[in-house]
Amino acid sequence: MGYLGRRIGLSQDNGDSNPGAAGGAVGGGLLDLFAHGYFERQGDLYNDPGAGAVGGDGLTATGGVISDFEDSGSRYRAHLFTATGIFNVTALGDFGDTVEYLVIGGGGGGGRAQQGDGGAGGGGAGALRYASSYSIPQTAPYTVTVGAGGIGGQTTALHGTQGTSSSFFPNSAAGNVITSIGGGGGGSTRGPNVNYPAGGSTGGAGSDSSPDNAAAATGDTGGTNNSASPADGWGNNGGNNSTGNSGAGGGGAASGGGAAAYGDAGDGGNGLTYNITGTATAYAGGGGGGKFQPNPGQAGDGGSGGGGNGGRGADGTYGTQATGGGGGGGGMVSSSRDGLGGSGGSGLVVVKYQIAASQSGTQTATGGAISYYNSKTIHVFTNSGTWTTPASFNKTVEYFIVGGGGGGGDYGGGGGGAGGVRNGSVPIIGAVSYPISVGAGGGAAQKGVTGGDGLTGGTSTYGPQASVGGGGGGGGYPNPRGGQPGVSGGGGGSDGGGSQSGGSNSGANHPGAYPYPASPTAGWGYAGGNQPSYPGSGGGGGAGQGGFGPPGIGGRGLAAPVTFKDPRAIYGDPAPGAPVPGGFYFAGGGAGGLGSGASSTSYGGGGAGGADPAPKGDVNTGGGGGGSSGSPGIGGAGGSGIVLLAYPS
């Protein structure tokens, strides 16, 4: 009866679904109420928990990626923040003011193994805080800050850097801030820069290090799966090291990092598992230690919960985004090549609350974060997973797939090219099980180690559809190079003179009209910008526009189709002032390292230039990383991609 009692007069399709809007603008015309509300329970009303939900309404709230799911016979909604934003509660519902939260800091970067040394330590996981019952005030906007992962060992700081903090707090209440600090960096190999930054969990010690693992974890030991945490969160120390060729593992939320042995590097400590998103998932694992390849033994594995693997005669791998996992420690590659540490995974904030007493259930496919809007079921994959349908499935599925952005170049380097965009629809009949891959952002250039060029982003896939990554930005001073090719090319580098070309594009140029036609197989992409003269490195190409020269602004990205623009959710680049209103922009190019380099007008998550280390592309946008403007010349890593799917509910 509460639903029938809403305002009569405005069409449900014309109302804005906000009871507090001018004129009480919730739709409620009697004809529409019968035609839409009775048969569908109109999908574009806020708090629609999916067809079949009964027994009251939950909070009215917006922000992040939305996941609706059933647990023990009741219906819940989780808001997943993989990037900084606002969780805005505008009304309480029938289930009170209690929410669950999970707050994880960014993971620490793995250490760097110097030439002639052995293996560096893995990065520690970000602190993990969880509460099953937390009371929130009515109509309160909450600021959500998602911490970045620490950077792997650099030229001037051979240890990995600490990840940054994640937090969740009401804007109107001073204090009462829920904060999880970042994980500590992994230790380097011998040298004057043997440091172990403190963190929720600390990094492992590098080989030939003294003292061993000096900083203690600030997180508390003793955590178990789905357990409530103390105020400092869960965390453990990284492993110690008394050997000559291997690195120790970084600490995780559930266990400490493994100590290094002479033969094998230490594994990262394991993370803890929570089902707050509707799927049991491990978070906050430590990075594995690195290992010098010619000696017997293995590099350390990353801990469960997103820890990166240590490198065996190679660079350490990155911690998984949105888990707070530590980066893997580097293993010395050769007498002339250091083993770089992997950067830590970004943090995560999740808020969960009940939205219905029961659910009869119309959901037909599983995988990713699932929500319901405008009579469509939407699946959002921010990390790799599996999309599965039952034998009875017979629907046309709309897809929007973004590859990982390319990394930015070193000192004076070009901006990274954006990940490609594939959009279209495909009929799916019967039972399928499609692996979903979300492409990682391309690694950042480090002067004198990677040749100065940013690396190509990873490929995102949905079944047979794939969207490849953007090209890396060209290196700068003292040996400038052209941008790397990709679906969108990276920008050309600069040393203050000469002319370097932007990388070529394999993607097709976008036609410019909205709504978009289905993309070609190669996806949408543009060439990177040239560097014709000083100042200004070239900007990376975007999915919707090419990068362009001085001042090196990255190419413009593209907005997702209107199908995916659920007003309760916020993901992608909000892009205020963009040509297509409503935000949800993706695949913007990174800015060049010299010149003004601001990337704010490119839309789509590209990193800005003009700093060192340069800003990264935004997580889950496919934005290119920014080019570096200084020394030691650390370009910005590209932003990871995303996969969006939708079909009639």
Image: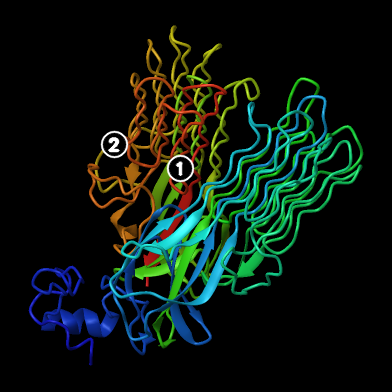
Q: Which of 8 and 423 is in front in this view?
A: 8
Residue 155 falls left or right of residue 489: right
Q: Residue at x 22, y 43 (%)?
A: 577
The residue type indicated by label 1 comes to: Gly
- Nearest to the observer: residue 640 or residue 130: 130
- How far, Cα to Cα, is label 2 from label 1? 20 Å
Classify residue 63 by image quadrant. bottom left
Say what amino acid the circle numbered 2 marks: Pro
- Residue that carries the numbered disc 2 in the rendered image: 511
Residue lying at 37% horizontally and 20% vertically, measured from the top left? 595
Q: Is residue 389 left or right of residue 177?
A: right
Q: Tell me where residue 219 sits by quadrant.
A: bottom right
Q: Can residue 123 be seen in this view?
A: yes
Give the foreground label among 2 and 1: 1
Quadrant into which the C terminus falls: bottom left
Read off the residue under disc 1.
Answer: 622
Count neighbours of disc 2 (C-alpha within 10 A) and say few if under 14, some if 14 to 19, many if 20 or more. Answer: few
Residue 591: percent from left, percent from top: 40, 29
Q: From the viewer's perspective, is residue 284 above or below residue 289?
A: below
Residue 23: image location, x then y, percent: 8, 72
